[in-house]
Amino acid sequence: MKKIVITLLFVALTLSSFAQKKERKDRIKALKVALITEKLELSEAEAQRFWPIYNAYEKEAEMLRINARQKRRDLDINTITESEAKSALNDFLAFENEEQLLKSDLVKSLLTAIPAKKIILLKFVEEQFKRKMIEELKKRREKKGTRN
């Protein structure tokens, strides 16, 4: 009976952890959407064309990042052979090329939805959002460090 309770408690805590990560990810996405919407001043018609394109891009870019991250994690720099290292470099370059193609496709698709000026502004807003997120992360880490 004790094992069952401990197992259930462990499962509950694990699920809770996953739920918190998803909530945090959803909150960050909502903040990004709000910032983009505010700064780009999309009309209703523009927003209806813009968001499906942008969301599809974000989904593909995330999958690319996940795959690249996994390949990096699988590398053991201490035991890798020269031929494996060359193969890994080719994989890294392929990832960067694929990422660039994805960005290029995004711009081409967005040109059918919003003006070029707003696409340039989107790039600035994305960079601004990334900087804000990094600053917030630094603040939280500093705050966490002072508590210890």
Image (cartoon, rainbow, N blue to C red):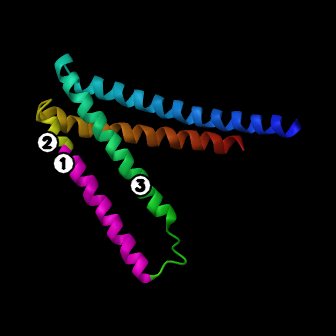
Vertical side of 89 occupied by 107: above or below: above
Which secondary structure is most common in the magenta stretch?
Answer: helix
The 10 Å Cα crowd at callout 1, few under 14, some 14 to 19, many 20 or more, is few
| Picture quadrant where residue 13 is located | top right
The disc at residue 67 is 3
Residues at badges 3 and 1 in contact (C-beta under 8 Å)?
A: no
In this rendering, position of residue 112 left or right of residue 30? left
For the point 41% across and 55% down, which residue is it? 67
Seen as rendered, the residue at the extreme bottom is 82
Q: Position of residue 79 (x, y in %)?
A: 54, 78
Q: Position of residue 28 (x, y in %)?
A: 45, 32
Q: Is residue 127 magenta?
A: no
Vertical side of 100 occupied by 120: above or below: above
For the point 57% across and 39% down, which residue is it? 140
In this rendering, position of residue 146 left or right of residue 7? left
* Structural distance between the alpha carbons of marks 1 and 2: 6 Å
Seen as rendered, the residue at the extreme right is 2
In this rendering, position of residue 97 left or right of residue 3? left
The disc at residue 104 is 1
The 10 Å Cα crowd at callout 3, few under 14, some 14 to 19, many 20 or more, is few
The quadrant in which the N terminus is found is: top right
- Secondary structure at numbered mark 1: helix
The disc at residue 108 is 2
| Picture quadrant where residue 91 is located | bottom left
Camera-side residue of 4 and 56: 4
Task: Name which residue type carries label 3.
Answer: Asn
Vertical side of 96 occupied by 118: above or below: above
